Amino acid sequence: MSNDVKVYSGRNLVFWILPILFIVFVFAFGCKGEVEKEETIRIAVARFSHETCTFCPKPTTIEDWEYSGPPTRDIIADRGYIGGFKTMCEEYGSIELVGILSPRGARGGSSGSWITREAFDKYSNGIVDDLRQAGPFDGVFLSLHGAMAVTGIPKPEAELARRVREAVGDIPIMVTLDLHANEDHELSGAADAVFIIKRYPHYDTFLQGEHAARVMIKTIRGDYKPTMATRKPGVITPSVYQGTGVSPAMEIMERARRWECQHPGVYVSVAFGFAYADVPDVGATVMVVTNNDQKFADRIADDMSDYIWRMRKVFAGKMLPKTKEGVAMAIAAAKAGKTPVVIADHSDRTGGSTHILEELINQGANNFCITTLRDEKAIQEIQEKAKKGDPVSIDVGGYSDKFAGNPVRIDGTVEFLGEYGRRGTVVVLLFGDNNRVILTPQLTQITTPDIFAPLGIELDSLDIIVLKSRVHFRRGFYETGLAGAIFEVDAPGWGPADLTTLPYKNIPKDIYPVYKKD
Ligand SMILES: [Zn+2]
């Protein structure tokens, strides 16, 4: 009996152990598979952004790049490209973002001229060295602007992407760009996919960051094979015509969105370009990304490029009033009660131009505010000699570049003198019949009326507001319904609406409207 039991126990053992072994086996391998799937993806994040006005007088040096601090590894997750990229990665989960040593914004922003070779090499090699040290990575995200101009390097963003490619090898490199980018096939050849914002004012930086992250993650997982087509329609336009709330910029972007909506997983980008950089890849660029469909990418890119070419005359051939005429129109509109009237002093790329200030005084305007005028010397002089409430007699502006006009004598009082956030020391001079000029140490583009209250200026008391802006001011002065009338005035400056007046040396000899006229 006991023998029988023994035999029976042995059978029992085999009966139980085999399934247990099987379960352990399956569990172990199943878990291994699971772990592999959930393994953290490592993505490097670097940024290097500039929009270079090569006609402006002052080169952009290492000192300019580091005025607010040395390069940083901080991943600044704001409402911009990197914020969107990071947010999308967090939604996917199990992704480690590694900040790569990147330069901050350069002093003076877009009023800076040619970036020195030394500065470009320092920051691009810094990014590459950091990538080598902190790697290996599964992907690299480059948050760029696309309108850098560097002495001796014709296409800097493409050069950066090539250097990054050499360091990281065959892993996805995704790039985001501003719609003021000047790029061509060299960038799309070095990177895997490029995503460009579609709105000016620039509301969709976050969204394009999200797109870059989604395509990056799908590509790393093997679910997407970015395939690009790039076209140059051969058209350049001044920034002041590129606002996407008006034709034909609006229709061009709408056409791109239509392709995207009809074909999920397809990304259709258009950069209008930055005309004030004298570079070989200047002007409009179409970049299309599909999932492994070169033919389709080519078809869309051709369609978009042909459309931009067909729109060239409407796009590049508008006319704007010159200083005298534009100021007269603004004063008439103010008298007709369309206040506040906004004058966009769009052509001033260095910030210290006085043409419109001088003309407003000559034509006897009142209740106007120059928002802002760059004059670091006048600010220093006022700081040394005066305090709030003191009378002053001082020359302002007229020296930031050769088109900046004459210094204008202001006999008035110091209404405000103090620090104003990141803008540094700001001075408000009150003069004449409730007229003001806001002095800033750098070119300062004001996009919303938020500046006035902290400086003690009542918005309601202003009939005419002069802004050193082309399109971004529409954010706070037009889209909110605030401005009663807007006049884009073509004063002399390094950012003219008529591009044929610029002394280009490096742009293609067949580009419309500078060389090709029809
Ligand atoms: Zn831009």
Image (cartoon, rainbow, N blue to C red):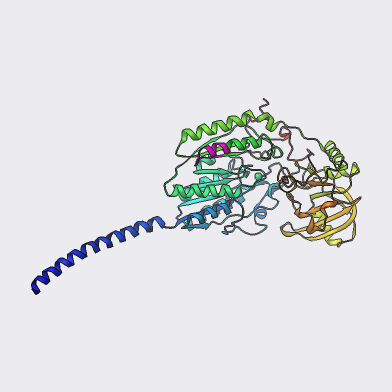
Q: Position of residue 193 (x, y in %)?
A: 51, 43
Q: Position of residue 394 (x, y in %)?
A: 88, 53
Determine if residue 104 is in view. Answer: yes
Determine if residue 185 is in view. Answer: no
Name above or below for residue 188 compared with residue 135: above
Residue found at x 54% / y 34%:
301
Which range is magenta?
257-268
Figure disc tally? 0
Front-lying residue, 514 or 13: 13
Name above or below for residue 257 compared with residue 4: above
Q: In this view, does 402 lie to the left or right of 435?
A: left
Q: Looking at this rendering, what residue extends furthest in the bottom direction?
A: 2
Residue 413 placement: quadrant: bottom right
Q: Position of residue 493 (x, y in %)?
A: 77, 40
Q: Position of residue 223 (x, y in %)?
A: 43, 46
Residue 499 placement: quadrant: top right
Residue 159 lies within the magenta run: no
Front-lying residue, 292 or 459: 459
Residue 104 placement: quadrant: bottom right
The quadrant of the rendered image in which ligand 1 is seen is top right
Q: Looking at this rendering, what residue extends furthest in the top direction?
A: 518
